[in-house]
Amino acid sequence: MIKIILLIIFALSVAMIAKSKGYNMFFWFFFGFLFPPIPIIIILLLPRKGSTYFSMKYPGFNKETESTSGDDPLVQCIACGKMIPINASVCKYCGKKYDIIDTDNK
Ligand SMILES: [Zn+2]
């Protein structure tokens, strides 16, 4: 009997961690109840569930790099060193003009 109570407490704590990470509480409750102690290890290792599948699959993938991935490739401004789009005619940070993209300083 004590064992079942401990199991429920264990499953509940798994469910609470799952809920705090944005996962389905009931699924993790039963998972924790049926297969102790595996689920608590899995749920502790799982990243916080993001809004997209991509951020879940790649937890290190932050929004900063994600926002630039769909745009033109970036190049470093030769005048100020900031990252600007490769087809930009003028650097938006320092105003350096680019007729063509090369490092010719005529
Ligand atoms: Zn610049």
Image: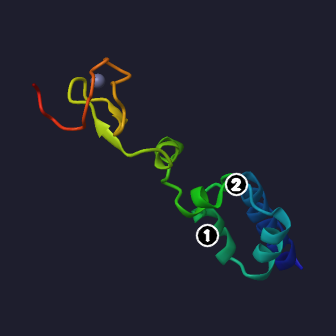
Q: Which residue is mark 1?
A: 41
Residue at point 73%, 81% (across, down): 35
Q: Callout 2, which amino acid?
A: Lys
Residue placed most toward the observer, 79 or 59: 79
Residue at point 75%, 61% (across, down): 23
Q: Residue furthest left?
A: 106
Instruction: Locate residue 43, reporting x and y percent.
Output: 65, 65
Mark 1 is surrounded, within 10 Å at the Cα level, by few (under 14), some (14 to 19) or many (20 or more) other residues, namely few
Q: Which residue is mark 2?
A: 21
Residue placed most toward the observer, 1 or 90: 90
Distance between the alpha carbons at the discs numbered 1 and 2: 14 Å
- Residue 42, by quadrant, is bottom right
User: Position of 88 compared to 7: left or right?
Assistant: left
Figure quadrant of the N terminus: bottom right
Figure quadrant of the C terminus: top left
Q: Secondary structure at mark 1?
A: helix
